[in-house]
Image (tube, rainbow, N blue to C red):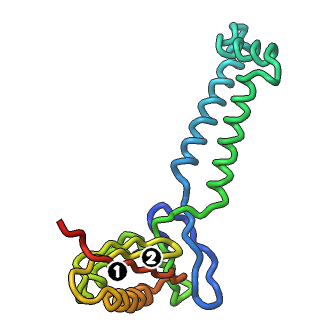
Amino acid sequence: MSEDGPPDGADQAGEQDDDGRTGRFWSARRLPAALVALVVLGVAGLFLYDVAAVRAHRPAMRWRRHLAHALATRHLDSPWVIGGAALAVLVGLWLVLLAVTPGLRGVLPMRAGSPDVRAALDRRAAALVLRDRALEVPGVQSVRVDVGRRRIRARALSHFRDLDDVRNDLDAVLADGVRQLGLARRPGVSVHVRRPVKR
């Protein structure tokens, strides 16, 4: 859980609602930003060096002469032109998607008690807490809890007691556990209980 600031890799949280709920934390996207910056810097540096070399009455680099010749002679319906354009479109869409989505799917925003405090809970930590609570239910032999942003799924094995009774107790325990986590948006809970496979 992170308090008084966003978790590692985040730079801001969403706006707080009137009822105290906060939006998701936004990722800083440091790796994609660094990769794009390095590519732009490298390409710009190559072109700048080549232009400076031509201004100094030296021949242009072979790759730039080849590129200029290819751009002048290839038709727009060439597979290479179409493939390059498609790749540029895909990279552009990927960058736009990164810019407009929050990211940080591994953390769940918590309800803010104060406008100056922002907190988030790691999904794996929430799953461990709920799993420990579920194992306290009589009749539960083992349980697996998967915590998503909108739904929490629990799959339990029960070696005694009626399955409906175990399921009802798990529903109540997990619902109380989710409430105590203090999440900004309380996810739904689905519980599946079955007998262990006999060998």
* Percent coordinates x, y for residue 74 in the rendering: 79, 16
Q: Amino acid at mark 1?
A: Leu
Identified at 55% across, 58% down, the residue is 28
Q: Quadrant of the C terminus?
A: bottom left
The part of the image, by quadrant, that contains residue 166 is: bottom left
* Percent coordinates x, y for residue 14 in the rendering: 61, 74
Question: Upstream in the sequence, badge 2 or badge 1?
Answer: 1
Tell me: 171 left or right of 188.
left
Tell me: 85 left or right of 114.
right
User: Dot 2, crowdedness within 10 Å: few (<14), some or many (≥20)?
Assistant: many
Residue with the mark numbered 2: 152
Measured in 3D between alpha carbons, the distance from the residue under mark 2 to the one under mark 1, in whole angstroms, is 10 Å
* Percent coordinates x, y for residue 54 in the rendering: 72, 13
Relative to 10, residue 175 above or below:
below
Contact between labelled residues 1 and 2, with CB atoms less than 8 Å apart: yes
Residue with the mark numbered 1: 130
The part of the image, by quadrant, that contains residue 24 is: bottom right
Relative to 136, residue 81 above or below:
above
Identified at 56% across, 47% down, the residue is 32
Q: Is residue 117 visible?
A: no
Assign a secondary structure to mark 1. Answer: helix
